[in-house]
Image: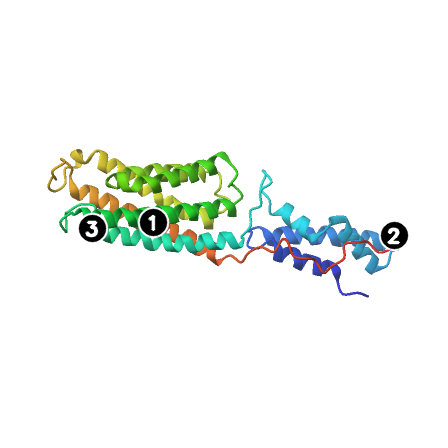
Amino acid sequence: MEPDLIDAYIVALRERLGRRRDADDIVDEVADHMREHADRLVARGEAADAAQHGAIARFGDVRVVARALAATDAGALAVPTPGTRRAGSAGLAAAVAWCVAAVVGAAGGHTEVLVPWTHTRYGIWVCTLTLAFGLSTLTVLGLLVRIGRLRTASGAALLVVGMLATVAMYPFGWAISVVAAVFAVTVLAGFARSWQHPDLVRPLRLLAVWLLGAVAVLFDDVLAIGPVDTYGDYEIVWLLAFLVGALGSAVAVGLVGLRLRAEPPANLGENLDLSVTASA
């Protein structure tokens, strides 16, 4: 008798599903159905080898089956790829950029609570903010691909807002808390229906800190904490709102980046060394 072809099929299918959370349940169910079909063929008088070939032929090419199981309702694949792993690297780099932006902002780039503000420090600060937003947008792009939501209206809105926020940093860096709050709202809304991937998406909830920061900045005169600058703003409120938002963003995109990087790419396209043609 040939080696167990159904076992080989199931192993190949499992490998191609990558780290899908319900992959084990799916392949167990497929295996049960294939075994039941093979048993019925044996009961009709077919040889065991021919029965296994027949069961495999009934289910079809493992690559086609894996793609169907890895697709969303809209037909988009929702599996790890080399591109999503690179997006994970962008997430880790974004986390570093947000931390650097926090340091530079406190060191005279954003306010002069701790260090005197200068145009040079402001320029360095907005450059780091631009880099942080750009890398964060790339991370979001990879996450959209990973969960199969890139070609949706919410996915397109996420990318557009991310790019606009990146471009807006130099002229509007001083309003970082408000701009980042708009980005955060778009991200939270865009992934609102994607919590079936909790390990990947849940860290993004930390971006909600920007909403609190934006409220604090817009109503800083109500809080009235610390001295007032030449523009009539309470610098301590503005700086604290930014620092909390930047560090929250660093943790959020850093965790997403780590998890995207940790996923081995799904194997959905290699040639299959297993015949799916039923033997006579």
Sequence-earlier tag: 1 or 2: 2
Sequence-earlier tag: 3 or 2: 2
The percent position of residue 39, horizontal first and vertical second, equals 80, 54
- The residue pinned by badge 3 equals 106
Front-most of 69 and 146? 146
Sequence-earlier tag: 3 or 1: 3
Colour setup of the view:
rainbow
- The residue pinned by badge 2 equals 44
Dot in front, 3 or 1 = 1
Q: Quadrant of residue 77?
A: top right
The percent position of residue 95, horizontal first and vertical second, equals 35, 53
Pointer 1 local density, CA inside 10 Å: few below 14, some 14–19, many at least 20: some
Dots 3, 1 in contact, CB < 8 A:
no
Q: Is residue 28 left or right of residue 223?
A: right
Q: Is residue 67 left or right of residue 250?
A: right
Dot in front, 3 or 2 = 3
The amino acid type found where label 2 is placed reads Arg
Front-most of 108 and 254? 108
> Visible in this render: residue 3?
yes
Q: Is residue 77 left or right of residue 116?
A: right
Q: CA distance from mark 3 to mark 1?
A: 17 Å
Front-most of 218 and 156? 156
Dots 3, 2 in contact, CB < 8 A:
no
- The residue pinned by badge 1 equals 131
The percent position of residue 189, horizontal first and vertical second, equals 42, 36
The amino acid type found where label 3 is placed reads Ala
